[in-house]
Amino acid sequence: MNTSWDFLHFSFFHTDFPTGHGEGSGVTQNPAILWAPIGNSSQMNCSHNKDASYFQMYWYHQRPGENMQLIVFTAVGGTPDFGNLDQSNYEAEKHNFESGSFSVKNLKPEDSGVYFCAVSQHSDAE
């Protein structure tokens, strides 16, 4: 097996969606910084201390010099929604309202960047 020792850098930012202010208002993402070898997988975790109405979680990716892109939306009891993305490279889990995880599989150079976790309170459309 040929192993590449090139590493990818991941930085993380968390927010209370949709406000996007500062430190995340009770949202915690870990690890804060992650270096992982190309070809490996990497898992990020997100949790919050809000009430059970904040059961929706979003994961975003921002490459250097580019706009943020939504990767996946998750909600307790639902199937992760990757939109038009090839979900074979990703995995997302949301087993309870206060936490979730996101994984990138078979890391490639283009996976490097900043990953954002956001939580949202459910509201009924009127």
Image (spheres, grey):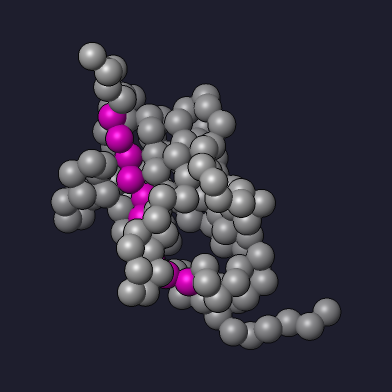
Asked if residue 103 is positioned above or below residue 93 in the image, the reply reads: below
The stretch drawn in magenta includes residue 117:
yes
The C terminus is located in which quarter?
Answer: top left
In the picture as drawn, the residue positioned furthest to the right comes out as: 1
Residue 78, percent from left and from top? 52, 27
> Whole-percent x and y of residue 24?
23, 50
The reply to whether residue 101 is visible in this rendering is no
Q: Tell me if I can see residue 15 in this picture.
A: yes
Q: What residue sits 79% from the left and 83% below the top? A: 2
Outermost residue, top direction? Answer: 126
Q: Is residue 1 magenta?
A: no
Most foreground residue, 6 or 83: 83
Residue depicted at x 26% and y 42%? 17
In this rendering, is residue 24 above or below 121? below
Asked whether 28 or 54 is in front, the reply is 54
The picture places residue 98, in percent across and down from the top left corner, at 38, 35
Q: Position of residue 55 (x, y in %)?
A: 38, 30
Identify the magenta region: 112-121
Q: Is residue 107 left or right of residue 35?
A: right
Principal secondary structure, stretch drawn in magenta: strand
The N terminus: image quadrant: bottom right
